[in-house]
C-alpha cells in the first residue's frame, strides 16, 4: 500500500505542481526541476543545530547550479514542543514539500510524524536526535543522519588521557593521583548525553586513570544553564575541581563563563593561585573552536555539522530524484548515515576551523 504511494509519488508531485500553478504545461513531459525540503528543528537557538542548518543552506546554494535544479529549504522551529513539530509536518505535506528533515523534539515520540509521512508518501530524514530502530523500520522511506555518540565519549576521554600522559601534574593539581572532575550533561534521555557521559569515564578508566566524580548536573546543552551549574560546583568544590567534562561545547563555554567571573581570566586565576580546571567539550562549534584557540578549552570533539548537513542534502536528492549517493556517503542498511567524530586540540584547531567555515556567505 505505502509502496504504491511512493511509486505514485512523482505523479502526485507533478499534479501538486500543476494545481499550485507552476509553469509545467499539461501534455508536456517535464522533468521535475525542483527539490523542496521542509526542515523542523527542535530548537532554533541550539548552537550546534543552527550551525548544521547554515551548513545545509550553504551546500544547497552551492549545488543548485551544478544539479541544475531549484532547491527550496524552509526551516521551522518546533520550539521544543513535539505537537508543534507534528503540525509542521502536516504543513510540509499540505504545501507539497518533497521531503522532510526532522530534528525530533522527543526522540521517543516519532509515531505521529511517521504515520503522517507514510500516508502522504513524503519521505523523512530524521537527524541528530536519534529515534529507536523499530520506529525507523516502520516504513521504507525513513532515514537517520547523525553520528555514533559512543565514539564522541571515547575521543573526549582520549583527549584528557593524552594530556595526562604528557603532563599529569598540571592536571592532577593536588597530586593525589586521582582526577577529580565535574560533569555537565545534556538533556536527560538524549542518546548523546547518556552515551557521552558513560564512555568518557570508561575510556579514562580503561587507560588506567583513577577518577573521582565531585558533581554531575544536567544543563540541557545550554550555556547559561551550565554557567549556573558551574557556579554551584565552584562554590561546593572550589579548587578541588581539576577537570570539567561537558557533553557539548556550549556547556563547556558556560563553565568557562563561570570560571572567568568567579576566578578571573585564566592567567589572572593562575597568578592568584587558583588555576582554572581543564575544560573539554564536544561539537567543534565556531565559538567552541575559538575558545580552544584562546586556550580556554583543552579540547573538543568535532561533531561534523558540515558532513551531516551535506549528507542530508545528498540523501534528500537521492531519495526524491532517484540519483546515486556520492561514493563517500554510505547509507548503512538503507537507513543510516553516520559521520565520524574527530578529536580537536590546539594542534589541529586551525585546520578544523578552516574546514568547517561556511564559504560564500
Ligand atoms: C550536540 C549538542 C546539541 C544536541 C541537540 C548534540 O549532538 O552535541 O550540542 O545541543 O545534539 O540535539
Image: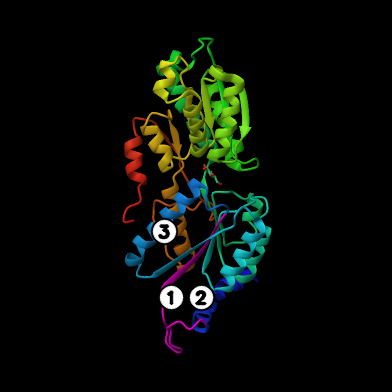
Using the image, tell me which numbered label, if any, was put on residue 32: 1
Q: Which residue is mark 3?
A: 57
- Give 157 or 247, whichever is nearer the viewer: 247
Give coordinates of residue 350: x percent, y percent. Answer: 32, 37
> Compared with residue 240, is residue 328 higher up or lower down, i.e. above or below?
below
The residue at 66%/52% (across/down) is: 134
Residue 267 in picture, x, y percent from top left: 39, 22
Above or below for 27 versus 232? below
Precedes in sequence: disc 1 or disc 3: 1
Q: Which image quarter is the C terminus in?
A: bottom left
Residue placed under numbered mark 2 in the picture: 10
Image side of residue 91 versus residue 152, left or right: right
Q: How many C-alpha atoms fall within 10 Å of the one at disc 2: few (<14), some, or many (≥20)? A: some
* Range shown magenta: 20-41
In terms of sequence position, does the residue under pointer 2 or pointer 3 come before the other? Answer: 2
Is 55 contained in the magenta span? no
Task: Measure the C-alpha gap from mark 1 to mark 2.
Answer: 8 Å
Q: Position of residue 174 (x, y in %)?
A: 51, 11
Element on which disc 2 rests: helix
Q: Nearer the viewer, mark 2 or mark 3?
A: 3
How far apart, in angstroms, are the residues tagged by discs 2 and 3?
Answer: 24 Å
Which residue in the rendered view is the most extreme toward the top?
Answer: 175
Percent across and percent down for residue 158 are: 47, 27
Residue appearing at x 53%, y 17% in the figure: 239
Residue 212 in sight from this viewpoint: no
Identify which residue is drawn at 47% across, 59% down: 315
Amino acid at each position: 500500500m505505502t509502496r504504491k504511494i511512493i511509486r505514485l509519488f512523482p505523479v502526485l508531485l507533478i499534479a501538486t505542481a500543476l494545481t499550485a500553478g507552476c509553469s509545467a504545461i499539461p501534455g508536456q513531459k517535464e522533468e521535475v526541476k525542483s527539490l523542496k525540503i521542509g526542515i523542523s528543528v527542535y530548537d532554533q537557538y541550539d548552537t550546534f543545530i543552527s550551525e548544521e542548518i547554515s551548513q545545509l543552506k550553504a551546500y544547497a546554494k552551492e549545488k543548485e547550479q551544478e544539479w541544475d535544479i531549484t532547491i527550496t529549504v524552509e526551516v521551522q522551529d518546533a520550539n521544543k514542543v513535539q505537537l508543534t513539530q507534528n503540525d509542521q509536518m502536516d504543513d510540509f505535506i499540505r504545501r507539497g514539500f518533497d521531503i522532510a528533515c526532522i530534528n525530533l523534539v522527543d526522540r521517543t515520540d516519532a509515531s505521529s510524524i511517521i504515520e503522517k509521512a507514510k500516508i502522504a508518501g513524503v519521505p523523512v530524514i530524521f537527524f541528530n536526535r536519534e529515534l529507536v530502530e523499530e520506529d525507523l523500520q516502520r516504513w521504507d522511506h525513513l532515514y537517520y543522519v547523525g553520528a555514533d555518540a559512543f565514539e564522541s565519549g571515547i575521543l573526549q576521554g582520549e583527549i584528557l588521557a593524552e594530556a595526562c600522559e604528557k603532563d599529569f601534574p598540571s592536571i592532577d593539581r593536588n597530586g593525589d593521583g586521582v582526577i577529580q572532575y565535574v560533569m555537565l550533561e545534556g538533556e536527560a534521555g538524549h542518546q548523546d548525553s547518556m552515551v557521552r557521559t558513560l564512555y568518557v569515564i570508561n575510556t579514562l578508566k580503561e587507560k588506567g586513570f583513577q577518577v573521582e566524580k565531585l558533581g554531575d548536573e544536567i544543563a540541557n546543552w545550554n550555556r547559561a544553564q551550565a554557567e549556573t551549574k558551574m557556579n554551584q560546583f565552584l562554590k561546593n568544590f572550589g579548587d578541588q575541581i581539576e577537570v570539567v567534562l561537558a557533553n557539548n561545547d556550549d556547556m563547556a563555554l558556560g563553565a568557562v563563563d563561570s570560571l572567568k567571573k568567579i576566578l578571573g581570566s585564566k592567567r589572572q586565576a593562575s597568578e592568584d593561585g587558583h588555576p582554572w580546571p581543564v575544560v573539554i567539550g564536544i561539537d567543534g562549534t565556531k565559538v567552541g573552536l575559538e575558545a580552544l584557540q584562546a586556550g580556554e578549552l583543552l579540547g573538543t570533539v568535532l561533531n561534523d555539522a558540515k558532513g551531516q548537513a551535506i549528507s542530508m542534502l545528498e540523501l534528500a536528492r537521492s531519495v526524491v530524484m532517484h540519483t546515486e549517493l556520492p561514493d563517500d556517503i554510505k547509507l548503512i542498511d538503507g537507513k543510516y548515515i553516520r559521520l565520524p567524530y574527530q578529536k580537536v586540540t590546539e594542534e589541529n584547531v586551525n585546520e578544523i576551523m578552516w574546514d568547517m567555515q561556511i564559504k560564500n556567505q
